[in-house]
Image (spheres, rainbow, N blue to C red):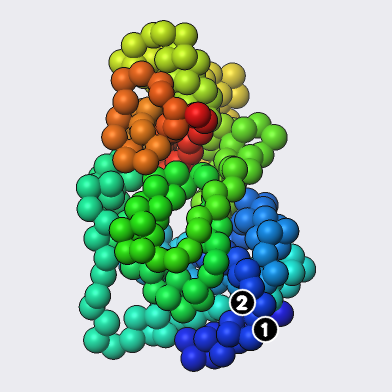
Amino acid sequence: MRITYDIPAALEAIAQLPRPLGFVPTMGALHAGHMRLVESARQECASVVASLFVNPLQFGAGEDLDTYPRDIAGDTKKFESAGVDVLFMPDAEAMYPPGFSTTIDVGEIGTKFEGIARPEHFRGVATVVTKLLHIVQPDILYLGQKDAQQTAVLRKLIADLAIPTEIHIVPTVRERDGLAMSSRNAYLGVSERVAAPNLYKALESLRTAMSNGESKIAAQTKATEEFMNRCNKICHEDPPNCHPERSEAESRDRENVCILDYVDAVDATTFEPIDTLRAPAFIIGSARFGTTRLIDNLWIAA
């Protein structure tokens, strides 16, 4: 595996690779979900390029840019073991040199849901991915389904700008209890990790209720109530596990431990909310467990 740190070296290394070429962009802190992307690329392409870059443009003020999990040595070994041909690991100055000011706004699709919670996020994602695609020029871009709105944003970006790259979406990899694998899972405390699979259960609840003909509003109310009841039950059954440093009475207060930000059904292409399930669609959700905010989704296939 060849490792490159600047754009000229990356261009030279990538130019020598046989086609078709698969590309897996990451921010590191690799888990099994990332490795599934690499495995898919390795199976389908003659060459695989991966990138490792914690992109400052997609983090807003007060977010976790400085504390985002990093394990460069471990990630490098994982990429090499998985058969990556070229690993591109630029720093912020290589990607955004002095005077850099160009960004990409993907329009309305980037203003909903995660775009509300993180107003600059999709502008940063669109900008960095466009630049990476320009550098790597892959035949296929591999993305994980877990970041559903991001995949929709990037599909629109590639279509609107006529970028000659296919997108392959790889299904979400989950822990045995249903929690979607995410680099931010490392932030979860003991009680928060126990509670976190309830986001997935809330998505399942909404899907089941809407599939059975319940109105979306009723289904959302039910999913939210079930989410909070399950979170409350964790502390009521084992208060010390909620926060070992707190008293039992304090541990029973779940207000700052589990918060369901949203659970909704959306069109898979536009991310406009839909009132009845019609494929292709996503059931999407976000929740906070302590200070950790997680997202997840369920794919509704045609």
Total marks in image? 2
Q: Decide if residue 243 is in sight here.
A: no
Residue at (55, 52) in percent of width and height: 168
Report which quarter residue 238 is drawn in.
top right
Q: Which residue is mark 1?
A: 2
Q: Relative to residue 72, is residue 189 depicted above or below?
A: above
Amino acid carrying mark 1 in the image: Arg
Q: Which residue is mark 2?
A: 87
Asked if residue 262 lies left or right of residue 48, the reply is left
How many C-alpha atoms fall within 10 Å of the one at disc 2: few (<14), some, or many (≥20)?
Answer: many
Report which quarter residue 42 is drawn in.
bottom right
Residue at (38, 27) in percent of width and height: 265
Element type where label 2 sits in the image: strand
Q: Nearer the viewer, residue 198 or 217?
A: 217
Q: Decide if residue 152 is in sight here.
A: yes
- In percent of width and height, residue 259 lies at 38, 32
Residue at (44, 20) in percent of width and height: 206
Element type where label 1 sits in the image: strand
- In percent of width and height, residue 79 lies at 69, 69
- In percent of width and height, residue 39 lies at 70, 57
